[in-house]
Amino acid sequence: METATKQGTPTTCPTRTLLELSGIKMVNQLLAGVHIASAAEAMAFGARLGLNTRLLFDFITISGVTSWMLKNHVHTC
């Protein structure tokens, strides 16, 4: 049985098989890619609307729809 800390990070974990860990890594990478692609699409859409992309980026990164991928992989002009 897993024991969780206050932040939700497991302190003890049952032994995982290599197949399980590989599957977890694939799901994680899929989500990372989806976040990057959707962030890029959103910024491109804002640019096509004529919005100031720096202002758009600043607003999105303080809103509820932000993500680590957006903050660290989207670059603005």
Image (cartoon, helix red, strand yellow):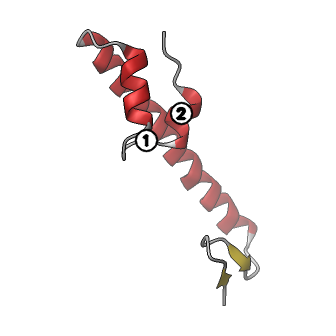
Task: Please say whether residue 14 is visible from this viewpoint.
Answer: yes
Q: Position of residue 13 (x, y in %)?
A: 73, 80
Write down the residue under mark 2.
71
In the rendered image, residue 32, in percent from the top left (x then y), is placed at 54, 43
Secondary structure at numbered mark 2: helix
Q: Position of residue 62 (x, y in %)?
A: 42, 39
Amino acid type of the residue tagged 1 in the rendering: Thr
29 is higher (above) or lower (below) than 18: above
Instruction: Identify the residue position indicated by label 1 in the image.
Output: 66
> Measured from the top left, where is residue 66 in percent x and y?
43, 41
The amino acid on which the numbered mark 2 sits, given as a three-letter code, is Lys
Residue in the picture at 53% in, 33% down: 71
Q: Is residue 74 above or below residue 62?
A: above
Labels 2 & 1 near each other (Cβ < 8 A): yes
Q: Is residue 45 found left or right of 6 in the rendered image? A: left
Residue at left offset 68%, top offset 75%: 10
Upstream in sequence: badge 2 or badge 1: 1
Q: CA distance from mark 2 to mark 1?
A: 7 Å
Residue at the extreme bottom? 1
Q: Which mark is residue 33?
A: none
Q: Residues within 10 Å of mark 2 (few under 14, many from 20)?
A: some
Judging from the image, what secondary structure is the residue with disc 1 in? loop
For the N terminus, which image quadrant?
A: bottom right
Whether residue 38 is visible to the viewer of this picture, yes or no, is no
- Using a 10 Å C-alpha cutoff, classify the residue at mark 1 as few (fewer than 14 neighbours), some (14 to 19) or many (20 or more): some
Residue beneath the point at 74% across and 78% down: 11
